[in-house]
Amino acid sequence: MAEREPHASEEEFKKRVLHYPDVPLTELVPGSKSHLVVGERILVSFLAMAANSYFPPHRHEAEQIMIVLEGYVDEIIEGKLYSAKKGDVLILPSNIEHGGYIGDVDCQVIDIFSPPREDYLQKLSKAIGKIGK
């Protein structure tokens, strides 16, 4: 068996790996809170949306991929409903209008944005500021 590479030091590990539940929650809209993880050119949102909540239609420059992990959502895309359930992946091009109605159970998704959304970066900055006080 070939020799394996050495393990990263604790300092190296902390630089590259985080435990997303330890990232502070950021409220995106009422009923929707997310752990936002930001890289240089990508933002990942570990999003929990409360049952019977609503994500108003909006658009943004960032391309978005949404992965439904739990529950379901009636995603509004350009004025039409797309019922997405656990295991579904939605691909939303830049500047397309979209939003969503959350069903009668909580919904958890992973949203991936490229480039990172400026409005989310601002919300994250405010959330981190509140923790430091």
Image (cartoon, rainbow, N blue to C red):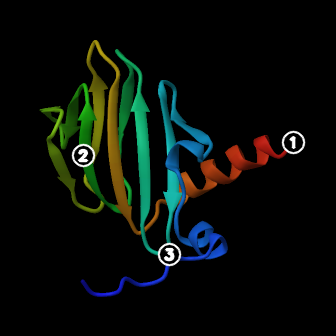
| Quadrant that contains the N terminus | bottom left
> Badge 2 local density, few (<14 within 10 Å), some, or many (20+)?
many
What residue is at 59 percent from the left and 47 percent from the top?
Answer: 23
- Residue position marked by numbered label 1 in the rendering: 133
Residue type at the position of mark 1: Lys
The reply, left or right, for residue 103 in relation to residue 15 is left
- Mark with earlier residue (2, 3): 3
Query: Which label was assigned to residue 67?
Result: 2
| Quadrant that contains the C terminus | top right
Judged from this view, the residue extending furthest toward the top is 104
Query: Which label was assigned to residue 30?
Result: none
Looking at the image, is 116 positioned above or below residue 41? above
Residue type at the position of mark 3: Glu
Q: Secondary structure at mark 2?
A: strand
- Residue position marked by numbered label 3 in the rendering: 40
Residue 35 x, y percent position in the rendering: 52, 45
What residue is at 77 percent from the left and 42 percent from the top?
Answer: 131
Disc 1 to disc 2, how far (Cα)? 34 Å
Looking at the image, is 122 positioned above or below residue 56? below
Observer-nearest of 45 and 53? 45
Residue type at the position of mark 2: Ile
Disc 2 to disc 3, how far (Cα)? 21 Å
